[in-house]
Amino acid sequence: MKVGVKLPTVLRPFAGGIERVEVEPDEPNVGGVFAALEADHPALRRRLTDEQGALRRHVNVFLENDNIRDLQGLGTSLDDGAELLILPSVAGG
């Protein structure tokens, strides 16, 4: 099973500068994708989850048009070929 992960510009330096990462998670859910990201890009994972492994408050992850927070969070099931979009919140003023 392969899953694509699209990264915003701010996170690309932690994944070798690439816009889209493709991973093969051990588990067919978002948590499995994050574990696969950690194996390939450890610095990226730290920007997505906290020390307990929970999704950071300022990070939004979309499966198609749905925020995974509105689904089952990191337990959200994925099909082969799924695409995730990671969007960290941006604050400023």
Image (cartoon, helix red, strand yellow):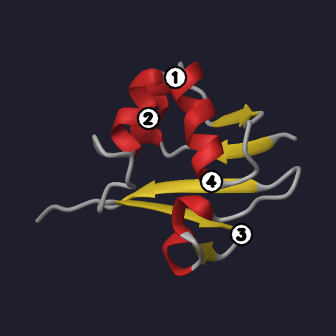
Sort mark 1 into few (<14), some (14-19) or many (20+) by Cα contacts within 10 Å: some
Q: In this image, 57 relative to 79: left or right?
A: left
Q: Earlier in the sequence, mark 4 or mark 1?
A: 4
In the image, residue 82 above or below residue 17? below
What number is the disc on residue 45?
2
Question: Under tag 3, what secondary structure?
Answer: loop
Left or right: residue 21 compared with residue 54:
right
Among the 4 quarters of the image, the one containing residue 92: bottom left
Q: Which residue is mark 3?
A: 64
Q: Nearer the viewer, mark 1 or mark 3?
A: 1
Task: Using the image, determine if residue 66 lies above or below residue 49.
Answer: below
In the displayed structure image, the side of residue 42 where residue 29 appears, left or right: right
Instruction: Check disc 1 and report its element: helix, strand or loop.
Output: loop
What amino acid is at disc 4?
Answer: Val
Choose mark 2 or mark 3, whichever is in front. 2
Residue type, mark 3 in image: Glu
